[in-house]
Amino acid sequence: MTTVTIDEDLRRKCPRVALACITATVTAHPALFELTAEISAAAQKLFGLADPKAVLESAPITATRRGYKALGKDPARYRGSAEALLRRALANKGLPQINAVVDVINLVSVESRLPIGLYDLARVRGDVVFRAGRAGETYKGIGKYDLNLENLPIFADADGPHGSATSDSERTMVTAETTRILAIIVSFGGSETLERYAQRTTALLERYAAGRDFVSRIV
């Protein structure tokens, strides 16, 4: 099994950082109607709040921003992926619909307000470390330009950086051919809610993506 660890320098700068790591066998088919309905309901639920934009100041979002600042990255220019999804939903643009696996991860990210990395294990080489990006490190983000990884909280395997709390890379992205995944829920505010959202992730993957062979661990 792929082992995920947190770099000691990152932990020193962000002492409350914690990860929930989930591996599973899945089927990345197009999302069923029931899943797209859940995603739409989650987006619309935001508009039922007394002050929808207040969600952007929720504890998980502000903790992520503090983590980025502690590492030396401007969270106004490089947003955590959960904040980016919430801003998209609040702009009434809906959430991206890619395939059942990716869509489940986006749904849990919106519900938890936490960034979640998602990787095709067949494309991950060796163990994974969560660390700050180094000067000169870049990769092509999914559907994006090359991302400047310096000081960004990133995931790196034996071949180098492949994911971050902002945007994952094309190298290890989940596609229709993916059968084994690694999902990593990132919290800069402590581990208290991670088990709940790990269970939510596994339940949704089982229901909508034929998920099985789950292994979950809090780091």
Image: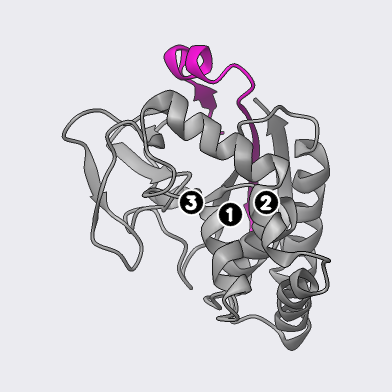
Residue that mark 1 sits on: 82
171 vs 204: above or below: above
Is disc 2 surrounded by few (<14), some (14 to 19) or many (20+) residues within 10 Å?
many
- Which mark is in front, 2 or 3? 2
218 vs 113: above or below: above
- In which quadrant will I find the C terminus? top right
Q: Residue 24 in magenta?
A: yes
State the residue at coordinates (52%, 76%). 98
Residue that mark 3 sits on: 119
Say which amino acid is labelled 3: Tyr
- Residue ranking furthest to the front: 51
Give the total of numbered labels: 3
- In which quadrant will I find the N terminus? top right
- Which mark is in front, 1 or 3? 1
State the residue at coordinates (80%, 68%). 207
Element marked by disc 1? helix
Q: Which mark is residue 113?
A: 2
Element marked by disc 3? strand
Asked whether, in this view, residue 140 is left or right of residue 206, the answer is left
Residue 193 seen in this snapshot: yes
The image position of residue 126, as x and y in percent, is: 40, 32
